[in-house]
Image (cartoon, helix red, strand yellow):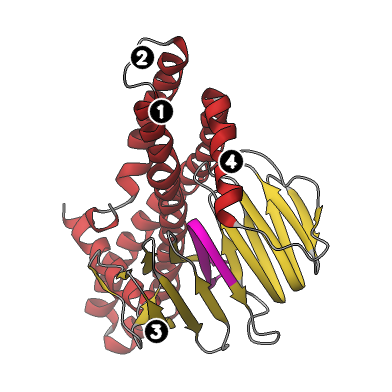
Amino acid sequence: MKKNIIFILIFTIFASTLYAQSIARVAFVDGWVDVRTAAGVVDEALIGDDLSAGSSIITGRDGYAELLERPSGSTFRVSPNTVFAIREREVNGRNESVLAVAVGEVAFKVNRVAGSGTLVATNSTVAGVRGTEFVVFSGSDGTTLIAVAEGLVEVEAYGRSVELYADEAVEVRPGSPPGPKIQLLGRALDFSQWNESRRQEFLNDPVAALRAVDRRLDYYNEKIQELQPQFLEMTERVLQMWAELDRIYLEQGQDAATQYDRTVLGPASINAVHIGLNVRYYALSALSMRRFVVGNMYAEMKSRYITRLNDPVFIEFRNLYNEVLRKFEEITISRINATDI
């Protein structure tokens, strides 16, 4: 218990510095728009609200919001019926903000210089952005459609990357690499029509659609299971270093203890927090898939088969759904906290 308390204190001290920085602010709102903070508090979004890692913007049927990223000046236009979150992960010892479109439509206008490292994630892919204007559609079945108006977007999933330039798009289905490029030829895309086509395809073969989502969830679970032992190992090492710090202080004095803290304990603590940050990133990604895709699928199927619960299709779907939930509760649920749910 003492070890847990000590490490929670370490994590809180370092994590507070990671999460405190404002990443974007609300520049415009219209209709129903809520902001959900990293602490789980949901309130009406107001112009001037600051958004840090862990925050989300949620728009209703008539809601629209425009966000301004700091310090780049990039803008994000959040359409109705959308959930847009700011997450954070660690790569090569550096924190990176990830702009996550959980469901719905977000249009991005990224500053060419300051926004060169922007990362955008959905339930099925991660896109690297280098100075561009593009739109991300995140469907209720977990499929993503990314359409570029200007610049370059590199879309990656399952080890395959596709570079999109102006007037090009790509669809990425959950559990699969990006599909072939789509030439837009000046066509405007409508999220509602596209999402309805994805819904109909799901209803045509719901078991196959859920299996695809399950593959994506397995990817998140594998990442969590890979990182968790490293996190626990680093946690134990940090706790041992705290004991060593006490010994050095008692035997060698304050100066030696300060030197040890600066050169050994501090870097190790930050490393532990970074690993924990990545575990949390993948856990929150799985939670998003569970909430906005798997939950939506089950509600759709329950409504459709409400008078035919013994239908073989519904039974097969329900069995797979229960297996998905079992893995989520076994692997993911302990990596998130009550404020996330």
Which mark is first along the chain, 1 or 4? 4
Mark with earlier residue (4, 3): 4
| Res 12 → quadrant | bottom left
Give the amino acid type for the residue marked by disc 3 in the picture. Answer: Gln
The residue identified by callout 2 is: 308
Specify whether residue 170 is in view: yes
Alpha-carbon span between mark 4 and mark 3: 58 Å
Q: Nearer the viewer, residue 276 or 175?
A: 175
Q: Are marks 2 and 4 in contact (CB under 8 Å)?
A: no
Q: Which mark is residue 249?
A: none
Q: Which residue is mark 3?
A: 259
Q: Is residue 336 left or right of residue 228?
A: left
Q: Which one is earlier in the sequence, the residue at label 2 or at label 4? A: 4
Residue in view at x 57 percent, y 24 percent: 205
Q: State left or right for residue 273 relative to residue 171.
A: left
Give the structural element (helix, strand or loop) at label 2: loop
Pinpoint residue 301: horizontal percent, then vertical percent: 41, 28
Tell me what residue is drawn at x 60 percent, y 73 percent.
108
User: Which residue has dot 4 on it?
Assistant: 198
